[in-house]
């Protein structure tokens, strides 16, 4: 739990029970989670707005990152880097399994640099590869 507290402090956020509990879930899960997934775990303790605000604070601080798939439902995954706040970028590939529908971060595959036309500025790139994950392939 001290790693969780350290990570929250390191990113300049106040330590609260919900932040510790939600970050523990992300720290022990190797695939992306939706707001609904988190809400299912904590609905008996926290309301959906508090959960949403916690997820938003984590995204803004660079602790987790947001992934959008073709359904438009946002999912969130732990960031595995040592950068703080505005330096943060998650330019890696995400993989969605068509069988179990889990989304995983493939940190070893980077999204290539794009050379945009003059006066265009990229703020974010999202590359989602779909297929069958290693678990479902067995």
Image (cartoon, helix red, strand yellow):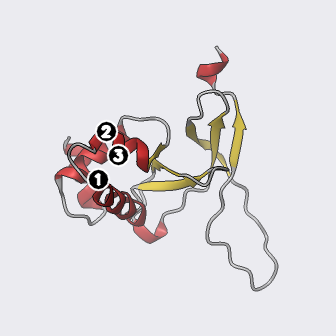
- Tell which circle, 2 or 1, labels the residue nearer the N-terminal end: 1
**Where is 51 relative to 40, above or below?**
below
Label 2 element class: helix
Name the residue at 30% across, 46% down: 22
* Contact check, label 3 and label 1, Cβ < 8 Å: no
Residue 3 placement, left or right of 83: left
- Dot 2: few (<14), some (14–19), or many (≥20) neighbours within 10 Å? few
Pointer 2 and pointer 3: residues touching (CB < 8 Å)?
A: yes
**Occupied quadrant, residue 56:** bottom left
Residue at x-position 82% and y-position 78%: 117
Q: Are marks 2 and 1 in contact (CB under 8 Å)?
A: no
The residues bearing labels 2 and 1 have C-alpha atoms spaced at a distance of: 21 Å
Residue 77 position, x and y percent, is: 47, 47
Please name the residue that numbered disc 3 is placed on: 39
Q: Earlier in the sequence, mark 3 or mark 1?
A: 1
Q: Residue at x 48, y 68 (%)?
A: 87
The N terminus - image quarter: top left
- Tell me if mark 3 has few (under 14), some (14-19) or many (20+) residues whose alpha carbon lies within 10 angstroms of its own: some
Choose mark 2 or mark 1, whichever is in front: 2
Q: Which residue is mark 2?
A: 41
Q: Secondary structure at mark 3?
A: helix
Q: Quadrant of the C terminus?
A: top right
Mark 1 sits on what residue?
7
In 3D space, how far apart are the residues under numbered discs 2 and 3 (Cα atoms)?
Answer: 5 Å
Above or below 23: residue 130: above
Residue 113 place in picture, x, y as percent: 73, 62
- Give coordinates of residue 125: x percent, y percent: 66, 61
Hey, which residue is sitting farthest top in the picture?
A: 138
* Residue 49 sits in quarter: bottom left
Estimate the spatial distance between the alpha carbons at disc 3 and disc 1, rounded to whole Å. Answer: 22 Å
**Would residue 77 appear left or right of 102 to someone viewing this image?**
left
């Amino acid at each position: 739990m001290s790693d969780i507290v350290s990570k929250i402090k390191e990113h300049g956020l106040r330590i609260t029970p919900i932040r510790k509990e939600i970050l523990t879930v992300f720290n022990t899960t190797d695939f992306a989670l939706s707001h609904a997934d988190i809400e299912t775990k904590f609905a008996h303790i926290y309301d959906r707005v508090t959960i949403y605000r916690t997820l938003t604070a984590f995204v803004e601080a660079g602790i987790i990152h947001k992934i959008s798939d073709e359904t438009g439902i946002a999912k969130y995954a732990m960031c595995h880097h040592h950068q703080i706040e505005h330096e943060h970028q998650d330019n890696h590939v995400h993989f969605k399994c068509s069988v179990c529908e889990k989304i995983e971060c493939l940190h070893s595959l980077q999204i290539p640099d794009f050379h945009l036309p003059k006066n265009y500025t990229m703020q974010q790139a999202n590359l989602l590869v779909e297929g069958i994950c290693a678990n479902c392939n067995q």
